[in-house]
Image: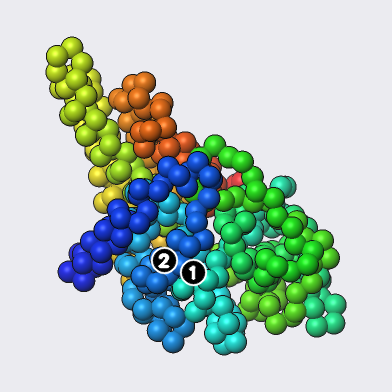
Amino acid sequence: MELYSEEHRVFRQALRKFVEKEMTPYLDQWEEKGEFPREMWRRLGSQGYLCPWLPEDLGGIGVGFEFSVIIAEELSRIDSGIGISLHSDIVAPYIFSYGHREQKARWLPKCATGDLVLAIAMTEPNAGSDLQGIQTTALKVGNEYIINGQKTFISNGIVADLIIVVAKTNPEAQPAHKGLSLLAVPASTPGLSRRKLKKMGLHLVDTAELFFEDCRIPETNLLGEEGKGFIYLMEKLPQERLLSALFSQSLAESMLEDALNYARERKAFGRAIGDFQHNAFKLAEMATEVQLGRTFLDDLIAQHIAGKDITMRVSMAKWWISEMANRVAYHALQLHGGYGYMDEYSISRRFRSIRAHSIFAGTTEVMKMIIARQMGLSGF
């Protein structure tokens, strides 16, 4: 199946020009500051690059998922796509799918312009991939929910204006996942505090700890129905993992391109280092793995667009492509020699960033557990 039409190719070309002109020259500066400028969110919104799938009456341009894929690919190539796709294609769909009319009208148009940035808070210090272990509570008192608890490793957690929080609205529910709900918490809400975390890479996406101390929100900020939070998460996680695999694939392709260009240009012992058999074979191996990832991923994207269940195969793609991208990063940096260890070369930044790809959105080990269960192996 051909995923992209001429319209898609024109869109990609325009986006690539935008990235080359308005983003690439400033990456080192943003990386050093450890932040993605708020004004750039608005610039992306003004060009239609945020939440493009939203209907026009909610601020989008009403296009298909293919356009979100193109945006994620192009921004991931410069290692700055994760926070943007998280906002546009992972968190905003919760509001669109489960929010009531007033919630959609209040928040989504601002999401499309970049005036309101989104995050989702699932992970806790003692509950990572095990969502049933969530301890944060949101107890209803009168016409309010009072939230208490802690979240960690929250991408966009500092820049976000609105955070979708996964919390227990019924701590007594059995099994525990039936007590989970989704609540929209404005970042300005009294009782919510945030701490920026320092990390190895991905410095263009902030990561935060969130603390809720008697944080009160109106009952109208409940997304969907009480007790259905776990169901909503299960419905949306396949797209999150598909995008995660896409981030890894795009970065792997960029790192391979960097390594190939360097191997053609760098001279040693009187010839290009790419002409040495070991290096040539290593690049051939990398190119093969990258192509395998691309073929698998494009097929998954087509199936997802067609509305098919991709739960098992996207778990395969998420772990394999992220691990493959880590292998590509290792060998690409090694080919650069000492220069690869220097931050003036993009492979240095990408090497640091790619390590997180096999951890976020479900670790490699959790993906294998999901696959095993889908195969009928449920003994763990």
Label 2's element? helix
Front position among marks 2 and 1: 2
Q: Residue at x 65, y 48 (%)?
A: 196
Label 1's element? loop
Colouring scheme, one of rainbow, by chain, secondary structure, one colour: rainbow
Q: Residue at x 41, y 82 (%)?
A: 55
The answer to whether residue 365 of the structure is visible from this angle is yes
Decide if residue 228 is on the left or right side of residue 40.
right
Location of residue 139 by image quarter: bottom right
Q: State the residue in front, 305 or 189.
A: 189
Residue 290, above or below 140? above
Q: Contact, CB < 8 Å: mark 2 with mark 1?
A: yes
Q: State the residue in front, 375 or 10.
A: 10
Q: State the residue in front, 152 or 346.
A: 346
The CA distance from mark 2 to mark 1 is 8 Å
The percent position of residue 81, horizontal first and vertical second, equals 42, 55
Q: Residues within 10 Å of mark 1 (few under 14, many from 20)?
A: many
Location of residue 264 by image quarter: top left
Residue at the outermost top position: 269
The answer to whether residue 357 of the structure is visible from this angle is no
Which residue type carries mark 1?
Gly
Q: Residues within 10 Å of mark 2 (few under 14, many from 20)?
A: some
| Disc 2: which residue | 43
The percent position of residue 44, horizontal first and vertical second, equals 40, 65
Q: Residue at x 75, y 62 (%)?
A: 192
Which residue type carries mark 2?
Arg
Q: Residue at x 42, y 32 (%)?
A: 343
Q: Which mark is residue 114?
A: 1
